[in-house]
């Protein structure tokens, strides 16, 4: 075991080094740094240990013998980072030199998950790290568990961004992910008496080894003030923006390593800081305390992630965040990534800016402003460039999720941008009137400016008008986007609309999260599937091989035991052996219908305790929920409370003889997903048809060998088509049926009256059985289902219960179940985010992988 001293590095000059060859870009003079060569000493266990101890001793400043697990984790992270460093600098240099088109992925959220495991996987250092740490008397798993995941996103949208940048790096495609470095990411969920209580997410508190701040490369972002017209030297009328306050954006770079390919792309997240000049007048007036408060005000911009998923709150700070990060990003790309003499008329040859939902759409008027007010373009020139540089992804069908910024607010914060938006809208309306003469209603419908309930800017319309391409995220969603959300736009510009079905990265969600299944797959068909997921098809014949099925089932069992250990330690939850593991994990939202799942559980329970169902006929089942609710979303929080009360009651009732259990581990996040999903037998994807844009959880489950019970919604449609009806439990109304029922008038009470099983379940909740006799505790949830529920849970109840009966029947036949599970894996290769990226590249971005 190495000594816990500087261990051969007492004199830094003795460090293994390749000399002072700086691999960074030539035009930035930097201090010479020793970089780990691509085939250097870190490839050996010995070299790894030296570097690790060196990091522990010099960066953490502790001896091994005295170091904490956190010290060890940080030293390990830095060791892996050092190893990737040369590749990162090399990637940057080559990309600049090649002057190729880059993807600028603009996203207000990146739900990254832990970094260490992914970095070890991408650099093939797992085995070396494992052995090296063992030599030091340490355990890799323990150190990995020390990492607090950067939770810089709410759910699917942020996780998608993280999957996409992983895929682009793996596919050798130049990409810079741009976003916000929230000091507090998504809140940590705790339960107090079954109710959600939010705790701040202090992900930076124990150190953040993965980030590289570059305060020297900060950019200034302006806000407020007014505009003025003036005539330039050529006598042309131009506009100045005279802002009245500003902040600095400090870039923090993160590595995005490709899988075993030597490429390391960059994720650049911006942190807000007060400028020196922030409040000079106040300083000068001698009010030091007020000036410091003003500094805090500036830094608020990147302080916290808004925890609303799918329901924007229209807060001023949120608009500040949006403009802050896109202004930083455009400035950064134009000033720092392009050559000094680059002709911006050709900007589209060097970047395509992908708008991840409407959050970054203010980038459209910002680019117009830069080109016109700063670079002297006239309107038509600027518009011609701008419309080639943006593409827009819509993520929703819910009308309340479409952002509309009040003009009053937008004009106060960004007066120049509002002027530009008005001018864009005038041009749009002119085009519409030209294409549809006399159709003034159409022009009014398509206006970027909404008049009711207040004057506001419809960001989705602005994005759609400006973008080269607009895409939905699953086939059904893209169809509904064209037909229902943006029908006038799709009629006028049909070629602009396209679909790219979402995907997930197989590196994190299969290879890393499910090592046993991955090993079995690689032993059976070779390792190529990790970057070519359609090759999972080669597993199909093995579905009929009893030996393979036994190994497949053994991997699932191993995952369940691993999960049991995690939940026992993390939440004090006991997972029984031999149960069907039925999992519903996703944000808590009415449209996702956690309450429908809960009604099924309550119904099973009610049937047993009322004697209608002999307990020995109950399929042993554990239902696991995982879900955060937006802190201000009352119905969602009440639903969480009810789930927890049902879980406690059902799990403790001896009449169930342990055959039905409900578990709700708190704080569902990527780290927990990586343990839960590989263990699941049944995947719950039960949104009302036409409401879930795509879903990506559904894909993760299928790829890990869970069978889906689901509606004909989002990407479920495509999952079912691919895996086959026999291996998917479909239930509920389809979208046209939902629309029809909606038009006719949904009458929830009729389902209650006509369905004794449903009535009994709801009555049991109303009786106070789960609330210590309090008959009104859950009135809001129950009466919503009974009276007004926009998402028609009761209409699909019977169909859902019937589908669950088919689940139980299949599960009773272990071979048939495992066969279906194998086929789910074999036929889900389409859902790799590599495939999604290929489609964006070919149909939207027209970029090239680098050789
Ligand atoms: C994949 C993922 C999601 C998205 O799940 P859906 O079921 O598609 O809503 C949300 N949160 C986390 C942590 C995820 O990993």
Image (cartoon, rainbow, N blue to C red):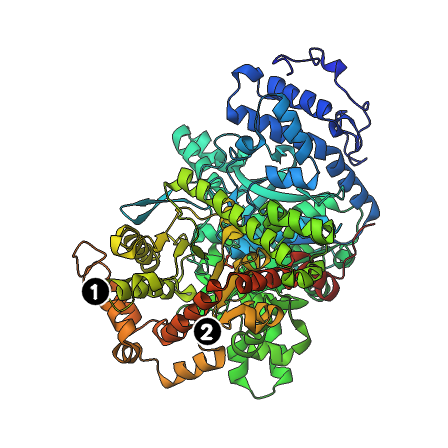
Q: As drawn, is 39 to the left or to the right of 421?
A: right
Q: Do the residues labelled 2 and 1 touch (CB within 8 Å)?
A: no
Give the image location of residue 519, x and y in percent. 65, 46
Between 342 and 725, the residue placed more toward the observer is 725
The image quarter containing residue 368 is bottom right
Give the image location of residue 851, x and y in percent. 83, 49
Q: Is mark 1 within 8 Å of ligand 1?
A: no
Q: Residues within 10 Å of mark 1 (few under 14, many from 20)?
A: many
Give the image location of residue 274, x and y in percent. 51, 37
Q: Please give the name of the residue rendered at 79% of the width and 56% of the height, measured from the top-left corner.
A: 848
Task: Look at the picture and state if 254 lies above or below 479.
Answer: above
Quadrant assignment for the N terminus: top right
Q: How far apart are marks 2 and 1 (CA)?
A: 27 Å
Label 1, on which residue? 766
Q: How crowded is mark 2: few (under 14 residues within 10 Å), some or many (20 or more)?
A: many
Q: As drawn, is 590 to the left or to the right of 729?
A: left
Q: Please give the name of the residue rendered at 42% of the width and 31% of the height, measured from the top-left corner.
A: 285
């Amino acid at each position: 075991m190495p000594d816990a001293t500087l261990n051969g590095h007492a004199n830094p000059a003795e460090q293994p080094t390749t000399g002072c060859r700086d691999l960074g870009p030539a035009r930035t003079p930097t201090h010479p740094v020793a970089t780990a060569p691509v085939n250097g000493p870190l490839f050996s266990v010995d070299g790894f240990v030296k570097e690790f101890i060196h990091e522990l001793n010099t960066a953490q400043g502790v001896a091994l013998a005295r170091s904490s697990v956190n010290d060890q984790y940080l030293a390990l992270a830095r060791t892996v980072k050092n190893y990737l460093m040369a590749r990162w600098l090399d990637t940057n240099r080559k990309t600049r030199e090649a002057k190729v088109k880059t993807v600028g992925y603009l996203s207000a959220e990146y739900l990254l998950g832990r970094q260490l495991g992914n970095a070890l996987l991408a650099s093939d250092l797992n085995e070396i790290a494992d052995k090296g740490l063992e030599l030091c008397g340490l355990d890799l798993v323990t150190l990995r568990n020390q990492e607090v995941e950067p939770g810089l996103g709410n759910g699917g949208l942020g996780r998608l961004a993280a999957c996409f940048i992983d895929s682009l790096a793996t596919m050798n495609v130049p990409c810079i992910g741009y976003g916000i470095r929230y000091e507090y990411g998504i809140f940590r969920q705790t339960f107090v008496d079954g109710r959600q209580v939010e705790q701040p997410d202090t992900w930076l508190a124990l150190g953040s080894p993965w980030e590289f701040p570059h305060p020297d490369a900060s950019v200034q972002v302006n806000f407020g003030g007014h505009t003025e017209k003036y005539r330039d030297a050529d006598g042309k009328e131009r506009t100045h923006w005279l802002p009245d306050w500003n902040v600095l954006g400090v870039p923090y770079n993160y590595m995005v390593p490709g899988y075993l390919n030597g490429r390391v792309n960059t994720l650049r997240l911006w942190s807000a800081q007060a400028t020196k000049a922030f409040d000079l007048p106040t300083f000068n007036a001698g009010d030091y305390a007020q000036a410091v408060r003003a500094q805090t005000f500036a830094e608020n911009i990147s302080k916290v992630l808004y925890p609303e998923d799918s329901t924007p709150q229209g807060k001023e700070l949120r608009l500040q965040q949006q403009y802050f990060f896109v202004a930083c990003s455009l400035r950064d790309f134009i000033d720092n990534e392009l050559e000094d003499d680059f002709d911006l008329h050709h900007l589209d040859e060097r970047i395509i800016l992908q708008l991840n939902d409407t959050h970054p759409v203010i980038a459209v008027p910002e680019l117009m402003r830069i080109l016109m007010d700063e670079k002297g373009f006239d309107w038509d020139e600027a518009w011609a460039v701008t419309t080639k540089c943006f593409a827009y992804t819509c993520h929703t069908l819910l009308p309340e999720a479409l952002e509309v910024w009040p003009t009053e607010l937008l004009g106060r914060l960004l007066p120049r941008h509002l002027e530009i938006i008005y001018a864009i809208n005038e041009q749009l309306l002119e085009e519409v009137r030209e294409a549809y003469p006399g159709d003034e209603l159409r022009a009014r419908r398509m206006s970027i400016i909404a008049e009711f309930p207040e004057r506001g800017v419809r960001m989705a319309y602005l994005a759609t008008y400006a973008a080269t391409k607009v895409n939905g995220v699953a086939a059904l969603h893209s169809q509904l986007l064209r037909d229902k959300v943006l029908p006038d736009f799709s009629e006028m510009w049909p070629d602009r609309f396209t679909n790219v079905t979402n995907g997930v990265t197989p590196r994190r969600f299969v290879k890393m999260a499910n090592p046993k299944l991955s090993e079995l797959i690689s032993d059976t068909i070779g390792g190529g599937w990790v970057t070519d997921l359609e090759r999972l098809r080669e597993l199909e014949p093995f579905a009929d091989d009893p030996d393979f099925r036994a190994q497949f089932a053994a991997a699932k069992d191993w995952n369940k035991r691993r999960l049991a250990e995690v939940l026992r330690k993390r939440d004090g939850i006991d997972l029984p052996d031999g149960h069907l593991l039925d999992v519903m994990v996703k944000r808590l939202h009415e449209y996702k219908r956690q309450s429908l799942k809960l009604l099924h559980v309550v119904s099973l329970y009610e049937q047993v305790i009322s004697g209608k169902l002999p307990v020995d006929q109950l399929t042993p089942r554990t239902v696991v929920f995982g879900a955060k609710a937006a802190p201000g979303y009352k119905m969602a929080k009440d639903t969480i409370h009810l789930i927890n009360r049902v879980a406690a009651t059902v799990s403790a009732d001896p009449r169930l003889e342990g055959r039905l259990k409900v578990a709700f581990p708190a704080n569902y996040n990527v780290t927990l997903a990586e343990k839960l999903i590989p263990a699941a037998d049944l995947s719950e994807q039960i949104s009302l048809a036409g409401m879930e844009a795509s879903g990506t959880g559904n894909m993760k489950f299928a790829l890990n060998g869970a069978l889906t019970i689901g509606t004909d919604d989002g990407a479920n449609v495509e999952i079912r088509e691919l895996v086959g009806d026999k291996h998917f439990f479909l239930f509920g109304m389809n979208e046209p049926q939902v629309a029809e029922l909606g038009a006719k008038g949904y009458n929830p009470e009729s389902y209650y009256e006509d369905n004794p099983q449903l009535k009994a379940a709801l009555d049991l909740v109303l009786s106070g059985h789960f609330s210590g006799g309090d008959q009104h505790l859950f009135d809001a949830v129950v009466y919503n289902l009974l009276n007004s529920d926009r998402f028609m849970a009761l209409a699909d109840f019977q169909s859902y219960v019937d589908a669950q009966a088919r689940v139980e029947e299949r599960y009773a036949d272990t071979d048939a179940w495992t066969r279906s599970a194998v086929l789910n894996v074999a036929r889900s290769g389409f859902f790799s985010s590599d495939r999604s990226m290929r489609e964006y590249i070919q149909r939207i971005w027209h970029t090239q992988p680098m050789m």
